[in-house]
Image: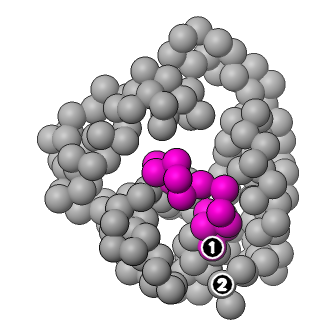
Amino acid sequence: MFLKYENLIIRNATEKDAEQLAEWWNDGSIMAHAGFPNGLGKTAQSIADSLREDTDTTRRRLIIEMDHRAVGEMNYDNKGNRTAEIGIKLCDASKQNHGTGKILLSMLIASLFHDLGYEKIVLGTNLKNKRAQHVYEQLGFTKVRVNENSWTDQVGELQSTVEYELYEKDFIDFVK
């Protein structure tokens, strides 16, 4: 995948990105929102090995570039039945809260629907992440369920999640 809009690029992650991904994934300040305040403890080699298994039809880890500099990551997983599960993380905190995430998600979602033929997109986020929920709802996602105290994070705190789904007919594209 290679998507470009103004100064933003979404591209397939490659083995060359493994060092950067390891840096982000092992940084507890970046991963805390996902329940990993101590980071994931992944090596660059294990990430590179995993990236070699990505395909357009199974799953793809993606790199977000702004002004030709890596600032975050996205992903999609084929869940079957023409359904993709997506995720996004702007790892450079200075790039957050400027509407960039909504544009990036629009780019990815439009490609999943129009280029790859998915009919439904799903995602989950921490119930505390109100900022993300607001963005998802602006894009047309519908809240499906809240899972109260459904898992325990690295430091033993119960966490709740909210699940969303989106069909093409409900998608509000902010890039058109």
Disc 1: which residue:
103
What label sits on residue 23 in the rendered view?
Answer: none
Q: Mark 2: few, some, or many residues within 10 Å (few <14, many ≥20)?
A: few
Residue name at image x 68 percent, y 42 percent? 125
User: What is the three-letter code of the residue carrying label 1?
Assistant: Ile
What residue is at 80 percent from the left and 25 percent from the top?
148
Quarter of the C terminus within the rendering:
bottom right
Q: Position of residue 33 (x, y in %)?
A: 59, 34
Percent position of residue 143, x then y = 84, 51
Task: Determine whether 49 is above or below 116 in the image.
Answer: above
Give x and y (percent) for residue 49. Answer: 18, 47
Residue 96 located left or right of residue 64: right
Instruction: Report the residue that reaches farthest toward the bottom.
Output: 176
User: For the point 39% across and 32% down, which residue is it?
Assistant: 27
First along the sequence among labels 1 and 2: 1
Q: Is residue 23 magenta?
A: no
> Start and end of the magenta stretch?
90-103
Can you identify the residue that label 2 sits on?
175
Up the image or down, 130 lies above or below 171; here it is: above
